[in-house]
Amino acid sequence: MPEMNIEQAEELLDMFGDGEGLDAINTSLALHLVDLARELGRDALITRLLSHAANTAESEEDRGWCQFELLKHEGADKDTIIGLAVNSEKEGLKALAAGILHYVALMTLGGEDAEVFANRSMRLREEVGDKEGMVYGHALIAHIAKEKEDWETAALHLRKRIELVDAEDKIALMEANADLAHTLATTGDLEQSQALLIESLEIATEIQDLSGVLVARWGLADLAEISDQPDEAMVQLSEIMTTFMEAGEVVPEPVRNRVSKLTELQ
């Protein structure tokens, strides 16, 4: 579904708020709207959308996705959701099982089981050739590895993530490059980290993504300070301030504070 602002999202959901218009949408779109309604706290609409999605589902997989979303909406416990994943895999619905297991991994982040669920989800996604799902899977496994300070494993999966990202998905590529860059900086590979941050910055500048500019230039400032180049760090932070002011946005407080501290040291 295309990116939209909050007003556009509210307007879209209002089209279905009283139940009218639902007959015109299929199960897949209804489930996408469930995610949107959840983000905006439209609980009553979520119930109607889930009911419509279940009634229009034409396949076992669609019905499985409906059941999964219903369990999430009802706040089902982990074991119940795992049970749905196990049953889905037994029925040959591997893509569904993979999505559910990915969700369970997110539920258990910080615990020992998260890695098990994330890896099982990834194996299923590889079996069905779910490229987009594999992108998310590698990012999740890398996150789990970073929690354990296993930087080598994290970097391995972040590289695989970049290889799989659609070149046309500029935001995903921007974020993937920056993520790997920060991981490599932690391992001391400053040269490769810098190259990736510059690439991420170029994309962020091209698509005018302020958060992307902030992340990339903040990382470049980190590398400059690590390399004992405070003047270069100041250049990067000043560029962040300029970019935000030119866009009519408030400069983030951490940026202003960091500039002040660097100024005091000079």
Image (cartoon, rainbow, N blue to C red):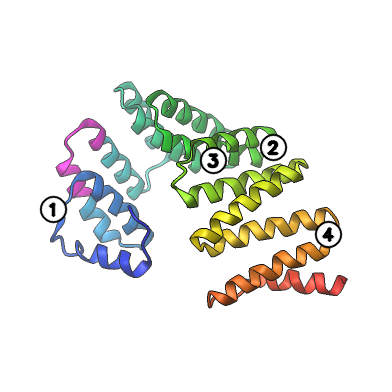
Residue 24 circle label: 1
Secondary-structure class at tag 3: helix
Secondary-structure class at tag 4: loop
Residue drawn where x is 63% and y is 73% of the image: 242
In depth, the one of 184 and 62 nearer the eye is 184
Secondary-structure class at tag 1: helix
Amino acid at dot 3? Ala
Residue indicated by mark 4: 229
Q: Position of residue 241 (x, y in %)?
A: 65, 72
Q: Give yes or no for contact between labels 3 and 4 (Cβ–Cβ under 8 Å).
A: no
Secondary-structure class at tag 2: helix
Residue drawn where x is 59% and y is 77% of the image: 245
Q: CA distance from mark 2 to mark 3?
A: 13 Å
Residue indicated by mark 3: 139
Q: What segment carries the magenta color? A: 50-63
In depth, the one of 223 and 128 nearer the eye is 223
Amino acid at dot 2? Trp
Amino acid at dot 1? Ala
Residue 15 circle label: none
**Looking at the picture, does residue 250 appear above or below residue 223?**
below
**Looking at the picture, does residue 126 appear above or below residue 224?**
above
Residue indicated by mark 2: 151
